[in-house]
Amino acid sequence: MSSCMRVCVRWGQWGVALRRCSSSDAGVRVRFAPSPTGFLHLGGLRTALYNYLFAKKYGGTFILRLEDTDQNRLVLGAAQAIEDMLDWAGIPPDESPLRGGPVGPYLQSQRLELYSSTAQQLVQSGHAYHCFCTPQRLQLLKKEALRSGQTPRYDNRCRHLPAAQVEQRLAQGLSHVIRFRLQEGAEPFHDLVFGWTRHEVAQVEGDPVILKADGFPTYHLANIVDDHHMGVSHVLRGSEWLISTSKHLLMYRALGWTPPTFAHMPLLMNKDGSKLSKRQGDIFIQRFRTEGVLPEALLDITTNCGSGFDSNGMGRSLQELISDFNPSKITTHSALLDLDKLPEFNRIHLQRRVEDPQLCSSLVCELQTQLLQQYSELSLDRDILQSNSIKRVLHHRKGHISYVKDLLSPQYSYLWIRPSFSPQQVAAVTLEAPHIAALVIRLVEQSRELTVDWLNTELKAVVKQTHSTKYREMMKLLRLALSGLHQGPSVAEMMVCLGASETTLRLHKLLLPSLTHSE
Ligand code: GLU
């Protein structure tokens, strides 16, 4: 990879130059680099999103790289699921294990050759060395340190092995790892979020393993090798990695490579400041998807934590998130996520989808599927399942419901299942049912468009044309005929939701109650 040069694209008001890699047309190249040791959760989604926003804002490239070097902790299906979830969320990578790209493969287990040759390069230049310490010895070191109240660290013993001995042990085929020789004098670096930072890593840590006995690299080596070879210009990652950066920079220096620019993002926490727990299982993206959360609502709420934007917004689309994103506003304090607000976020974004003809059509399909799952095909009338009816319901209820599945609640069952009622029930309300039904049918048939306000006014006029029925009784009758319910939404609202033809069809049953409701 050729070296990167500085150009005068500015990161917010900080005056920090963005680095543009001369090897890539796109300049900004960022990556999301999860380990497939679990499924994508909200914290990971947020890291991916901020990388995506940054890439799109500056016309760059968003890479997905899977860091699967810890083979013992791999979770079956997680790698594919992570990419699927990014697609679902609407923030697909430009380069990835599934999509490929110019600097692949994007799965670290397929790049072992590169890591081992880099480790050899470091050995040859004296920056790394072979270590033959047995797991038993390391265990003992650890125990002793703990016993004397110290933090366990490798004592760098193999640093000092004479070359001849190393050769001899290698020739014997002894199991070994490669360790990076941590130099004193780690340089301070400027993190775009945390400012100037320095960890004198050699004073607190033993030399880290960079290549394991099985030939797999550790995170530190693989991560910097790939960031370099993939032309990554900016590393935007969780602040838990801030402490490792000095070590990474020592490795960049040893290899003579220009490091990327770093920006560590504060952790995402629950609104009470506690850690988002993966164990509860309720922060996995798949779960939100299954529950009917819209991806844009999830993205919107994860940015609503006071980091990366001039102000906290609600209801921003992905395009708006890209244009409003201001990386200089990423703060060092934890981002507090209030998941109690999720239904509200979803309500706003659901309304937007309903208003978009194309997106609305897929909501219609989704609701049709859910209806068929909830009610058997036999109990649903074909007219009711028609796209136009469903679309009307969605348009009428948008802004009132948070999730599509809310329309499956008992409160809305009248929409999908035609009510049955007995002539006795009708007679108990009023003896004028056929007369009232005829009046209301005429009203509905003559109307150009049913609206709640118009119906409320007109129904008051209808009751005046009856002989002895009170307004309250007429409403009770209409409610019975339209829904079979004693309580629920207002009659006018039900009529609007049901639409003119379904309303009249249901009211027709009142015309001859003794014949049509003999059950
Ligand atoms: N594989 C690391 C993780 O799981 C990546 C850290 C980084 O972005 O450098 O978070």
Image (cartoon, rainbow, N blue to C red):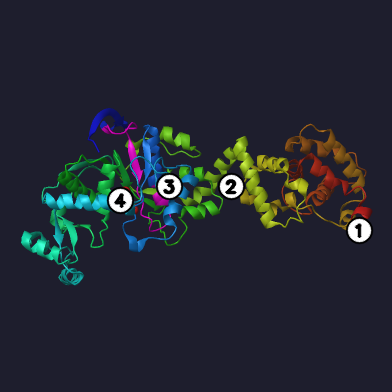
Question: Along the polypeptide, which appears first: circle 1 or circle 2?
Answer: 2
Viewer-nearest residue: 366 or 513: 366
Q: Residue under circle 3?
A: 98
Magenta-span inclusion, residue 470? no
Q: Residue under circle 1?
A: 518
Residue at image location 29% in from the left, 30% down from the top: 10
Q: What residue span does the magenta drawing correspond to?
A: 17-46
Q: Residue under circle 2?
A: 402
Q: Quadrant of residue 18?
A: top left
Q: Nearer the viewer, mark 2 or mark 4?
A: 4
- Secondary structure under badge 2? loop
Residue 56 left/right relative to 247? right
Q: Nearer the viewer, mark 1 or mark 4?
A: 4
What amino acid is labelled 2 in the image?
Ser
- Examine the rendering and report whether any part of residue 410 can be seen: yes
Question: Along the polypeptide, which appears first: circle 1 or circle 3?
Answer: 3
Q: Residue under circle 4?
A: 111
Residue at image location 81% in from the left, 47% down from the top: 475
Question: Along the polypeptide, which appears first: circle 1 or circle 4?
Answer: 4
Residue at image location 43% in from the left, 49% down from the top: 337
Question: Along the polypeptide, which appears first: circle 2 or circle 4?
Answer: 4
What amino acid is labelled 3 in the image?
Leu
